[in-house]
Image (cartoon, grey):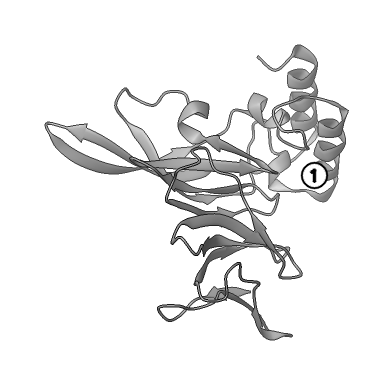
Amino acid sequence: KRVVLEGPAAQAFRWTEGGGVELLEVHAADRPTLAHDINDHGVVVGHVSMPNFQNVACYWDADGGLHLLPQVHPLSVDIDVRAVNNRGVMVGMELLEQFEARLWLGDEVYDLNDLTTGLPDGYILQDARDVTDAGVIVSEVAATIDGQIQLFTAVLTPRACSRVMGFAEPFFERDFADAVAYLDLFSRGDPGADLAEPHDQIDISDVLAFLSFFESGCP
């Protein structure tokens, strides 16, 4: 599968070997759409340009239907989804006074800077560019050093504990639905079920880790 966009006022489309080119739904007929990524389920992410020239984060479902995503700041002028994994986790950025990295889980949007620990003072996650099925996020980081803005790349690895609360909606609330969703991932050998060492190997130790975090309250 491949996502392609061409031209100054182009329309995003999805291409498959069996179906060829499929134009994706637009929000305003005279405004362009941009697609960045596609997952194995055919979900495409990017943004749509509005009549007021604001770019709004969105995704297209497997049938090509358009869904607008929420933003943290109502007055932001540019919101974009850069990547989506096979669990439907989406990452990207939002621009108001500065660029800030974003995470979308279901119908909720989060500032990645608020969810990240260990980031040095003055460093800002600006633009999340990719997310793996295991929840690892690659993001651009900006910091002012000796009066100069420096850009870095950060790899954000989710704590196994926090991932226990992200397997099913409502996200960040630990309940029975998370357990059911986790066991489904485990039975399919999904990388998202890898919670314990040795990593890259899904076995009973991962199930025990899940139960330990789940029962302990996931500190």
* Residue 72 x/y as whole percent: 52, 38
Q: Quadrant of residue 12?
A: bottom right
Q: Residue at x 45, y 31 (%)?
A: 113
Above or below, 42 relative to 83: below
Quarter the C terminus occupies: top right
Q: Is residue 199 left or right of residue 94?
A: right
Quarter the N terminus occupies: bottom right
* Residue 24 x/y as whole percent: 64, 74
Q: Which is more toward the observer, 188 or 38?
A: 38
Q: Residue at x 33, y 41 (%)?
A: 98
* Residue 154 x/y as whole percent: 40, 40
Mark 1 neighbour class, 10 Å CA radius: few under 14, some 14 to 19, many 20 or more: some
Q: Which is more toward the observer, 7 or 169?
A: 7
Above or below, 66 relative to 198: below
Above or below, 123 relative to 81: above
Amino acid identity at mark 1: Leu
Q: Is residue 109 left or right of residue 92?
A: right
Q: Which residue is mark 1?
A: 185
Secondary element type, mark 1: helix
Q: Residue at x 45, y 78 (%)?
A: 9
Q: Is residue 168 left or right of residue 48?
A: right
Please identify the residue farthest to the left as the structure is shown. Answer: 146
Q: Quadrant of residue 120?
A: top left
Q: Is residue 122 left or right of residue 136?
A: left
Q: Is residue 118 visible?
A: yes
